[in-house]
Image (spheres, rainbow, N blue to C red):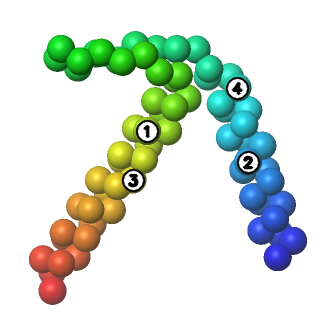
Amino acid sequence: MFAKLNFGLVLLFLIVIFTLQNVEVVTIKFFFWEASISRAIMIFLVLAIGILLGWAFGEVVHHRKR
């Protein structure tokens, strides 16, 4: 229990440091669409999309093997 708490606190600390170091606004352009967001938010969104796509692809492959 204590190890999980320490791990969680260290992970939270690293996320806060990462976010504070990547606060500058970047512009994303896709065809005619344009958005300005924080670099940290963009990285977290791309990570989340990658995780979801990897999970979905794994489920499809697992389902086809049955």
**Residue hosting label 4:** 20
> Where is residue 30 shown, x and y percent of the image?
23, 20
How many angstroms separate mark 4 from mark 1 (CA)?
16 Å
Earlier in the chain: of badge 4 and badge 1, it is: 4
Question: Label 2 belongs to which residue?
Answer: 12
Q: Amino acid at mark 2?
A: Leu
Give the amino acid at mark 1.
Answer: Leu
Q: Position of residue 20 (x, y in %)?
A: 70, 26
Q: Secondary structure at mark 2?
A: helix
Residue at image coords 52%, 23%: 39
| Disc 4 to disc 2: CB gap under 8 Å | no
Q: Which mark is residue 51?
A: 3
Q: What distance separates the C-alpha of mark 3 from that of mark 1?
A: 10 Å
Task: Out of 41 and 58, give the one closest to the viewer.
Answer: 41
**Residue 45, numbered circle:** 1
How packed is label 4: few (under 14 Cα within 10 Å), some, or many (20 or more)?
few
- Indicate left or right for 4 with 63 as reference: right
- Give the residue at x 18% y 14%: 32
Q: Is residue 39 above or below residue 11?
A: above
Residue drawn at the location 18% of the way across and 69% of the way down: 60
In the displayed structure, 54 sits above or below 61; it is: above
Question: CA gap, disc 4 to disc 3?
Answer: 23 Å
Query: Looking at the picture, which amino acid does disc 3 mark?
Result: Ile
Other-residue count near label 2 (Cα within 10 Å), few / some / many at <14 / 14–19 / ≥20? few
Could you tell me how far apart the alpha carbons at marks 1 and 2 are, in whole angstroms? 17 Å
The first of marks 3 and 2 along the sequence is: 2
Position of residue 21 measured from the top left corner of the image (x, y, whole percent): 68, 22
Total numbered labels placed on residues in the image? 4
Q: Earlier in the sequence, mark 3 or mark 1?
A: 1
**Image quadrant containing the N terminus:** bottom right
Quarter-of-image position of residue 36: top left
